[in-house]
Amino acid sequence: MLFRAIVAPLGISLSMTSSSFAADLVEAPPPAAPTWTLGIEGSPEFYAIDNGSNKARSLADTYFKFSVSHNFADNFVGGIFIQPTFKTGGKTQYYGEASLGYKIKLTDAFTLTPSVALGYTWHDTGIVKDADANAQIPYYALYLAGDWKLSKQWTWNVFNFRYRNAFNTTWETPKLATGVTYNIDSTNAVYANLGYSWKKADTTSAPYDDLAGDKLNIAIGYKHSL
């Protein structure tokens, strides 16, 4: 009887301790979601229209884009990218850009992301400013992206619209793109998109004395989050 009087309360105490320990394990918070994303994208670009010796659908250039972005806790997202563009004929143009956007969750599946960016392009730019046919220029850009999450793996990047222009010359280069993203797992994704851009330059010669078709492209990319 004395043994039972001692062991019984001890067993109850151990049982309560084990239950409490198990509850602590169950209630442990999940790991934090990744906030940094590294990306690489590549694409050939083709002329959209006939323009002198450049025939529609002939290769204009090939670019590679290397990017880093960060998701902040308050739905802001910031990013930078460097993009070398290798043109037919051996010329090369470079872009560097920094952006800040804000994610607006309209529904559980659809997110709208407006953003603003400042950039610089240099080397063989083909941008006319005064007597310079390869002006090195700072520029600004406005973006609006709409993404629809179809499932855990698939996202339809319904649209990504860009308006871009130089600060001190005419270089209007809007672009509209659509594509899909496949999430391999929680930290790795691949994507593809199709884009079409227009251009208006500081020139009196057609077609770019007014806004006209410039290039179309098919891009593929990879993103890793950490």
Image: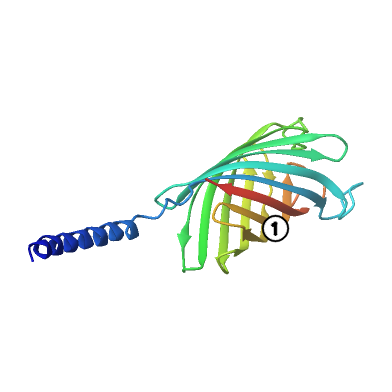
Where residue 4 sits, quadrant-wise, is: bottom left
- Secondary structure of the residue carrying tag 1 is strand
Residue sitting at x 72%, y 48%: 200
Q: Position of residue 112 (x, y in %)?
A: 51, 61
Front residue (pair 20, 60): 20
Is 207 on the left or on the right of 99, as rendered?
right
Q: Is residue 161 above or below residue 86?
A: below
Indicate the colouring scheme: rainbow
144 on left or right of 64: left
- Toward which corner of the image does residue 155 lie, by quadrant? bottom right
Q: Is 76 in front, or is 201?
A: 76
Task: Count residues near mark 1 (Cα–Cα under 10 Å), then give few for <14, some for 14-19, many for 20+.
Answer: many
Q: Is residue 214 visible?
A: no
| x, y percent for residue 165 | 64, 44
Q: Nearer the viewer, residue 67 or 117?
A: 67
Q: Estimate the x, y position of residue 105 in percent, counting from the top left.
A: 46, 63
Residue 170 sits in which quadrant? top right
Instruction: Report the amino acid beneath label 1.
Output: Asn
- As drawn, is 217 to the left or to the right of 67? right
Decide if residue 95 is in sight here.
yes
Residue 95 position, x and y percent, is 67, 37
| Residue in the picture at 68% in, 54% down | 175
How many numbered dots are placed on residues in this image? 1
| Above or below 161: residue 106 | below
Instruction: Say which residue label 1 marks.
Output: 193
Quadrant containing the N terminus is bottom left
